[in-house]
Amino acid sequence: QSVLTQPPSASGTPGQRVTISCSGSSSNIGSNTVNWYQQLPGTAPKLLIYSNNQRPSGVPDRFSGSKSGTSASLAISGLQSEDEADYYCAAWDDSLNGHVVFGGGTKLTVL
Amino acid sequence: EVQLVQSGAEVKKPGESLKISCKGSGYSFTSYWIGWVRQMPGKGLEWMGIIYPGDSDTRYSPSFQGQVTISADKSISTAYLQWSSLKASDTAMYYCVRHNGGATTHFDYWGQGTLVTVSS
């Protein structure tokens, strides 16, 4: 059972916009920034969104993040086949001397 | 170019010890926290703990405290994750990550992963 809650799956057709939610609590998302990681099949994860809504250099602006209260979301617009991957949210949790918590991951399928 | 290069895959028996490594290059190794992330087969990501190579300050996830040891040798820019007695449930891919800035920040670089298989 992950501390952050994500839907296990999401899907969309090419060109569509999809969103993935991430729900936490006051000790993690409620008081710290949210980061998102993309894991393409058979590869190491990579940073997709940091500090709630910032994109690292090289990440297309089709990807965007937002946060409100104890929830966050990742939006992907203009869905492409190469976006098919697992997506994970993460945040620092202030409880128990502090540690990073992840969501369980969302498998995105491009139909 | 920042790189984290991990040691190769390992196959071990239950009860054996193991130490895997992560060598950083292309940046000041002593100035960034290095963490470890576990991914069990077909499962999600789990943060295990971090170390600040500058002074070896180490913190563990409550789930992994006492189960593993994280260390670093700043003279060779290398961080380690070790087990004293492996269990079959330690079978997983292990990634090292660089925390961008403080311990609470995001992971901006990932190693390629080290697959650890524990089987009798």
Image (tube, coloured by chain):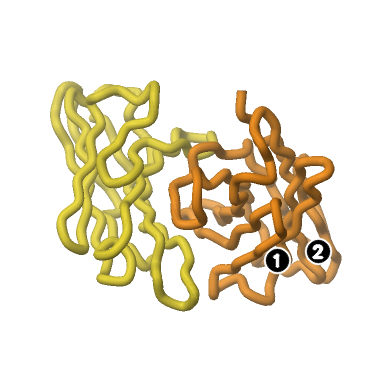
Assess whether mark 1 and mark 2 are in contact (beta carbons under 8 angstroms): yes
Quarter occupied by the N terminus of chain A: bottom left
Real-space Cα separation, disc 2 to disc 1, in angstroms: 8 Å
Question: Of label 2 and label 1, which has the lower sequence position?
Answer: 1
- What is the x, y in percent for residue B40? 56, 56
Query: In the figure, what tint was chain A given?
Result: yellow
Report the disc number at residue B88. Answer: 1
Kindly identify which residue carries mark 2.
B120
Identified at 77% across, 61% down, the residue is B82
Query: In the figure, what tint was chain B given?
Result: orange
Query: Callout 1: residue from which chain?
Result: B
- Taking the image as shown, residue A95 lies to the left or right of residue B115, namely left
Describe the element under mark 1 as helix, strand or loop. helix
Q: Is residue B43 above or below residue A12?
A: below
Residue type, mark 2 in image: Ser
Identified at 70% across, 32% down, the residue is B25
Mark 2 on the same chain as mark 1: yes
Question: Which quadrant of the view contains residue B58?
Answer: bottom right
Classed neighbour count for the residue bearing mark 1: other residues with Cα under 10 Å, few (<14), some (14–19), many (≥20): some
Question: Which quadrant of the view contains residue A56?
Answer: top left
Identified at 35% across, 44% down, the residue is A36
Q: Nearer the viewer, residue A58 or B32?
A: B32
